[in-house]
Amino acid sequence: MPEIKKILCAVDLSEHSKAVAEYASLLAKTHKAKVLVVYTAPSLSQYVGFHVPPNTIENFVGEIVTGAEKSMEDFVAEHFADVDAASQVLVGYAAEEILNRAHDENVDIIVMGTHGRKGIDRILFGSVAEKVVKNADMPVLTIRPKAPLG
């Protein structure tokens, strides 16, 4: 059986992230694994050409990251209190950043949520989870909304 020593838990800090954390925490406890909890803030660099000064965008992204770092600290303290866990805020396209971090950290499994979008919503918004599943070198456990343990 493959060993699980390191887990990447990708969250968006929505209400659904609690269920994702439950599964990642359970896996970590069961396998005595470490958890890296990540949140990806958008870079917003695609808006530089829209008459928005780059420094304004950089400042805004900086504020998002600062707020996300504090939220992540609180989230990890609440949901991973009895697990060896660390948090990190990434900046960029979520699927790409999750995959890069998973590769760089040599994780054994990725745990992440899916919004369960269908039809036109899925076409318009895409699916970060789908992109991660299709491109990951390691297993990916996806948690659909309303799937808490117990």
Image (tube, rainbow, N blue to C red):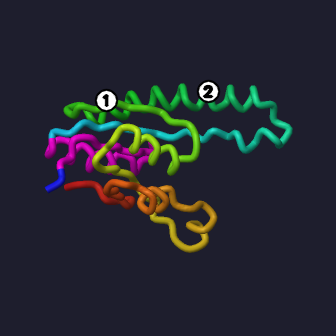
| 60 horizontally vs 117: left or right | right
The residue located at (50%, 51%) in the rendering is 95
* C-alpha gap between disc 2 and disc 1: 23 Å
Q: Position of residue 100 (x, y in %)?
A: 46, 44
In this rendered view, identify the residue nearer to me: 72 or 128.
128
Q: Position of residue 31 (x, y in %)?
A: 15, 44
Query: Residue 62's mark?
Result: 2
Q: Quadrant of the N terminus?
A: bottom left
The residue located at (37%, 34%) in the rendering is 75
Q: Are marks 2 and 1 in contact (CB under 8 Å)?
A: no
The residue located at (34%, 37%) in the rendering is 36
Specify which label sits upstream in the sequence, 2 or 1. Answer: 2
The residue beneath circle 1 is: 77
Give the quadrant of residue 143. Answer: bottom left
Judging from the image, what secondary structure is the residue with disc 1 in?
Answer: helix
Label 1 crowd bin: few (<14), some (14–19), many (20+), radius 10 Å:
some
Q: Quadrant of the C terminus?
A: bottom left
- Report the amino acid beneath label 1: Ala
The residue located at (23%, 31%) in the rendering is 84
Question: Where does the magenta region start and end?
Answer: 3-31
